[in-house]
């Protein structure tokens, strides 16, 4: 049986991801989050699938350890769904890294993802990927590069099309109705 370079690379990446993710448990425990050995293998297997799907390769353990570092204190991560959410975030990262034609650094994309995850999507990865990241990648492909100045933060709002909750407007409406 002959092993391909891709198979060997996938095994190395998977093992490195496993080690790096397990090492994060001490830090994430402060937030009530930990990955079991089974969870880590699921995330590592998902990494290999994501890389194959996007026809990418990784020399390190993938993006999941950086996602853990960036998202572990999010109020929307729960232990019960932590591993699944991490897999979804990882898949979204690789898809939109490709969709943005690698014009964003990993850190810029992760910063934008985290901000939208908490402030726009209320922890909904499907909305993050299907709306926020899709719009943003389209803007990046169209030439937008303002994210470089902010490291990926505070830029999505330029592309947000939904009307968001406005507390001051709410208070004004209550005053108009003599409810305050």
Image (tube, grey):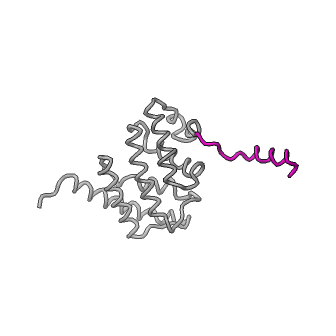
Left or right, 40 with reference to 177: left
Instruction: Name which residue lies at 52% across and 44% down.
Output: 132
Q: Is residue 178 magenta?
A: yes
Q: Is residue 180 visible?
A: no
Q: Residue furthest top?
A: 143
Which residue of the protein is positioned furthest toward the front in this rendering?
177
- In reply to whether residue 113 is colored magenta, the answer given is no
- Residue 168, image quadrant: top right
Q: Is 13 above or below relative to 139? A: below
Tell whether 7 sits left or right of 132: left
Q: Which quarter of the rendered picture does the N terminus lie within? A: bottom left
Instruction: Please state the horizontal and vertical placement of residue 177, each as a whole percent of the image.
Output: 85, 48
Image: 5 above or below 155 = below
Expressed as whole percent of the image width and height from the top left, the position of residue 25 reads 46, 65
Residue 78 pos. (x, y %): 54, 65
Report the magenta residues as a range.
161-180
Q: Residue at x 31, y 61 (%)?
A: 15
Q: Residue at x 36, y 53 (%)?
A: 62
Residue 90: x %, y % from top left: 42, 53
| Residue 118 visible, this orientation | yes
- On screen, 37 above or below 118? below
- Could you say which is closer to the camera, residue 37 or residue 86? 86
> Residue lying furthest right in this view?
178
């Amino acid at each position: 049986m002959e092993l391909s370079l891709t198979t060997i690379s996938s095994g190395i990446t998977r093992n490195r991801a496993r080690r790096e993710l397990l090492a994060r448990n001490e830090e994430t425990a402060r937030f009530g989050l930990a990955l079991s050995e089974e969870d880590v293998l699921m995330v590592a297997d998902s990494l290999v699938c994501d890389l194959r799907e996007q026809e990418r390769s990784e020399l390190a353990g993938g993006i999941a350890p950086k996602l853990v570092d960036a998202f572990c204190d999010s109020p929307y991560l729960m232990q019960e769904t932590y591993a699944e959410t991490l897999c979804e975030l990882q898949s979204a990262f690789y898809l939109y890294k490709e969709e943005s034609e690698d014009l964003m650094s990993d850190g810029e994309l992760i910063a934008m993802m985290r901000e939208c995850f908490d402030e726009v999507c209320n922890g909904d990865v499907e909305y993050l990927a299907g709306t926020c990241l899709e719009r943003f990648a389209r803007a990046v492909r169209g030439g937008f590069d303002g994210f470089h100045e902010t490291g990926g933060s505070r830029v999505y709002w330029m592309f947000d099309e939904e009307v968001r909750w406005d507390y001051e407007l709410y208070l004004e409406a209550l005053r108009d109705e003599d409810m305050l």
